[in-house]
Amino acid sequence: MSGEGFEVLDHVPLGVMVFDREMRVRFWNACLEEWTGLRREELLGRDVRDRLPQLWEPRYAGRLRDLFAHGAPAIFSSQLHPHLVPAPLRSGRLRVEHTTAVAVPAEGGGFHALLTVQDVTGLTEAMADLREARDEARRRASIDGLTGVANRTHFLEMAGRAVALARRHSRELSLMALDVDRFKSINDTHGHAAGDVTLVALARVAAAALREGDLIGRLGGDEFAVLLPETSHEVAGQAAVRLREALSAESVEWDGRRLSLEVSLGVASLHPAGDDLDSLLGRADEALYEAKRQGRNCIVLR
């Protein structure tokens, strides 16, 4: 209604609507016309619920009742429904709004409800992109760039937490140490690129052979470790056998030759009293070196 002094709100970069206690539209600004495709002339004096029924779901209706009853402001977020948006955003998402409702004095007493609608889609999408970039940075910081398994820092951090948790709750936990047999010979004979392909294949096969809850990490060079939560010494030995057999069954093709994936493995299990990650890793390494001394391509349990 043009005489009520709301015309100045045509010039603000927000959607603004005003309606009375009977939900009749008293004002509908130019910004809302652009966003919704609904012209002011179609709405003035009409029940706003006739054209925008989805805006009067319970979360809106209750707050608006409070506003008319007490003059209390209300702030809430919403999304315009598809048929209110003339064209989808490039991302395919709906426009995201931040909506504020306040009571304004009406001519002759009482209140009108004035709603401002701010389009925060760009901000919302920018924040989502920022979260995605942050998550990707964290992921990259925790994985080995060559093989895609956990890097040394991330593996040791997760293993340290798992050991502390297992000790606190008297749970079983085991750890494997493994490396590629005669890896230096692969590098010296075929070059470091062949060695890299071998390590990538090892990580791929090992990840497929292990349980979902197990964690494999590359500690450096051809040295890997596998954390086995909730795993007894016996079960860890069985897992090591499956892993060695899976790797032995694979080979890497390089320059017309087949390079084996044979590994030596050392297995150690957590001692509830007095054991920590360093001692557990130390015992697994000792078992690995013993496997090397016994002729390689075998498993030693400690």
Image (tube, grey):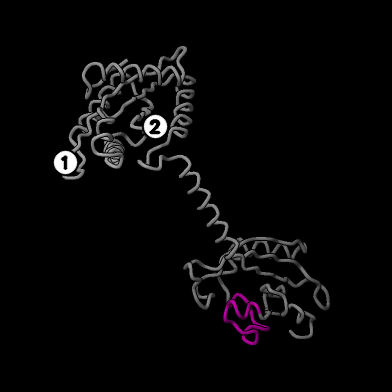
Quarter of the image with the C terminus in it: top left
As drawn, is 138 to the left or to the right of 241? Answer: right
Task: State the predominant SS element of the stretch in magenta.
Answer: helix
Circle number at residue 160: none
**Is residue 49 inside the magenta stretch?**
yes
Q: In which quarter of the image is residue 30?
A: bottom right
Q: What element carries label 2?
A: strand
Kindly identify the residue that appears in the image at 65 percent across and 84 percent down: 40
Q: Residue furthest front?
A: 188
Q: What element carries label 1?
A: strand
Kindly identify the residue that appears in the image at 21 percent across and 19 percent down: 295
Distance from the alpha carbon under mark 2 to that under mark 1: 26 Å
Q: Name the residue under label 2.
A: 220
Q: Residue furthest top?
A: 273
Near mark 2 (Cα within 10 A), the count class, few <14, some 14-19 or many ≥20, is few
Label 2 amino acid? Gly
Instruction: Using the image as rendered, state which of residue 57 and residue 117 is in the foreground.
Output: 117
Asked if the residue at tag 1 contacts the one at tag 2, i.e. Cβ–Cβ closer than 8 Å, the answer is no
Kindly identify the residue that appears in the image at 37 percent across and 25 percent down: 230
**Magenta segment, which residues?**
31-51
As drawn, is 133 to the left or to the right of 56? Answer: left
Near mark 1 (Cα within 10 A), the count class, few <14, some 14-19 or many ≥20, is few
**Is residue 291 inside the magenta stretch?**
no
Query: Can the viewer see residue 215?
Result: no
Residue 110 in picture, x, y percent from top left: 80, 71
Quarter of the image with the N terminus in it: bottom right
Q: Name the residue under label 1.
A: 257
Instruction: Using the image as rendered, state which of residue 290 and residue 94 is in the foreground.
Output: 290
Residue 13 in picture, x, y percent from top left: 69, 74
Query: Can the viewer see residue 44?
Result: yes
Label 1 amino acid? Arg
Q: Which residue lies furthest to the right in this view?
A: 108
